[in-house]
Amino acid sequence: MKNIVLVGNPNCGKTSLFNKLTASKEYVGNWSGVTVSEKKKILKIKDKDFNLVDLPGIYSLSGYSEDEIVSRDYLFNNKIDLIINVIDINNLERNLYLTSQLIDTGLNIFLVLNMADEFDKHGDKINLNGMMDFLEINIIKISAARNSGLDNLLHEIYRFDFDNNLKAKSFLFGTEEFFFASEIVDKIGCSLLIAFKMMEDDKNFLSGFDIKKENLFDELKIEDKDWNEIIARDRYKFIDELCNKYVKKDGGIDFSDRIDRILLNKYLALPVFFLIMFFIFELSFDLGGRIFSGYIEKFIRYDLVSWVKNVLLDLNVNKILIDLIVNGIIHGVGAILVFLPQIIILFFCLCFIEDSGYISRVAFIMDKPLRKIGLSGKSIISVLLGFGCTVPAIMSTRTLEKKRDKTLAIFLLPFVSCSARMPIYIMLANIFFEKNVGLVVFSIYLLGIIIFVLVGLILNKFVLIGEADDFLMELPTYRLPIFKNLLKNVFEKAKDFVEKAGSVLLLASIGIWFAENFDFKLNLVKDNSESILGFIGKLFVPVFKRIGFNDWRLCSALLSGFIAKENIISSLNILFLNVKYDLKEILSPLGAYCYMIFISLYVPCVATVCVIRRELNSYKLTCLAVLLEIFVAWIICFLIYNLGNLFLC
Amino acid sequence: MDKKKSFMLTEVKKFGFGIIAEIKNGVYKQKLNDLGFIRGEKIKFMEQALFGDPIMIVVRGCLFGLNKNVAKNIKVYLAD
């Protein structure tokens, strides 16, 4: 099967194109580094199958960070039949730089000019045929987001003659450096690009190859010049000439610039950012809850339960089975589905921020503050993703170039409260703090951030000493997110959530129901505290008693939360016949508040721990991270519980 | 202001235009070159974050954010 690779600058729409071509659902956003590892899919065109690979975005073929190295290694260590160089047509002048390097690899290449819709809207013009003839390369104009030009691209791939293709001419053809590079190529038989890299003395790049310079340069009489600058300058010179000749830009008004005057204003930037975040949380917790969740909850808890019960009773179904279905499954899984509206609103807002291009600006304005805890502005992107789910947040730390930064970020990210924990806060806040739900939930999030900062300060000062990597980042132009794509993104998230409820949470609910109703000899118990779960939960009571959870059911719910945080809600709903009243009896408002805090800070779910292990590549560090979260959670709850008792009494 | 005098990018405190005078040798040289920060290229000075770090500039039509540690490698001439 032929191997086709998508290569391009960050944020030029490679993943959008990949998704459209293979009908898959990889994650897309308007910031650099959405894709952090290679992704493969089969591309079917009529009767032919191709292997399509999506690589992380890179500005050039060097090796500055892990995801750039992934791209370099993939290109040079695999048999590549065709490179599809995806280019943001609105930013040809910079995107073509990578193109010029890709051409020098000597591989087959297609140029795909993406985001043509924006380009056309601006009234800009490009002479495609002229450019194609001049470069001797296939160029196709598309808009992946708007589905235009894709058929043409598929057609061109389909009829492409992989074996008998003329190679495109180097952008540097005719220059002094081209002359020397050709001599190097003749001498050692490498590709032009590697010859240029040898002249540039790019150690990052050459580290991946077994190449010895030795006396080659003396032999070929290659002078010791600032080749680095000369080569880059000449590549750009060629590109400028090319663009002047074939592209007519209208200039247009800079919409992005005007938004930035406000959003990135020296004094307004931070307040505006916090306001936006506050607004997002208010919208999801308060409004989302009030408008939607109430109805769903009522439906599941009362209408559905009584209907199912009646049907089952009519059918003379075994009482234990009815209990499993009603108290185990409906209460367990249903309790989670109630929170779907909030999750949808939260994800909608987060997706909007990402797609619009604001997220990299947040990195810009938060750079200085984050440096205080030893992180660079870039890591705020991981933090914002963390409000959605900790797993992608931890994966996104790959864009951090320094190992120290990455380790620090991974240790801290679990403190950012993910959306799976949100339902628990809302449920408990609704029971104990009816009048201030939004405020209480927001305070939990805020506390998570405060702990994030405090632990960061301590780790930075005593353990992971050093300075965060420097900040150098492109801030993409604002883009009004395409509503359809936004909805699709949110729909995927919602689907994941429901699927999780239907699989992991369903099984866990059944498991919890079973462990709650049977003892170790598999006899049905009358008193739940003698059940398997009761036994295990009681083991932990002494530890949690100190922070106010003096009930085995609360403890076993926490244990089940390790499988997935949503489980805590299911467990509580299964373990307590009437959550609202029963919880109020065993927990004081202060205890409930501590319970929420503990949930927000203690070990993340299994999935997160696995990702942490994979990214840190160390069992020892992973254990340390997990222990740190538990320790911090316990200490903070201990402090709040005891101080609170002191002041409230 | 003397046009021939070059400034470190970190010293430029106002909005306006300039020309890149030099990229200092060092870890950022190659990376900046790749991004189009090349001697003679036009540069537009934009907003700075609170406390003047990081700063924003436009080079070759792209908006970049960079912190002081990177910016001090770039020397510029100011345009009138």
Image (cartoon, rainbow, N blue to C red):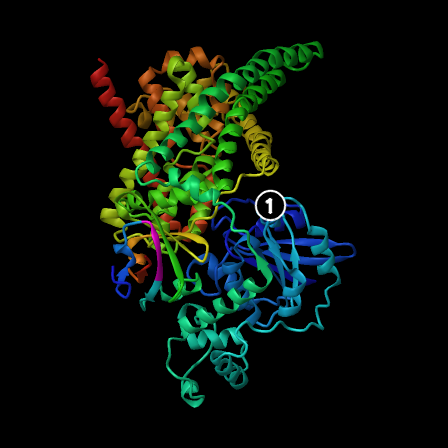
- The answer to whether residue A458 is left or right of residue A292 is left
Question: Is residue A162 depicted above or below A178 in this figure?
Answer: above
Query: Horizontal and vertical percent for residue A41?
Result: 64, 53
Question: Is residue A324 depicted above or below A351 in this figure?
Answer: above
Chain part drawn in magenta: B15-19
User: In this rendering, does residue B27 appear at all?
Assistant: no
Q: Give the residue at mark 1.
A: A121
- The answer to whether residue A188 is left or right of residue A132 is left
- The answer to whether residue A25 is left or right of residue A419 is right
- The answer to whether residue A3 is left or right of residue A573 is right
Q: Which image quadrant is residue A556 in?
A: top left
**Which chain does tag 1 point to?**
A
Q: Nearer the viewer, residue A188 or A461?
A: A188
**Magenta stretch holds residue A296:** no
Question: Is residue A634 depicted above or below A163 in this figure?
Answer: above
Question: Is residue A147 depicted above or below A221 in this figure?
Answer: above
- The residue drawn where x is 62% and y is 18% is A321
- The residue drawn where x is 28% and y is 44% is A373
Query: Horizontal and vertical percent for residue A588?
Result: 33, 15
CA neighbours of label 1 inside 10 A, class few (<14), some (14 to 19), many (20+): few
Amino acid at the residue labelled 1: Lys
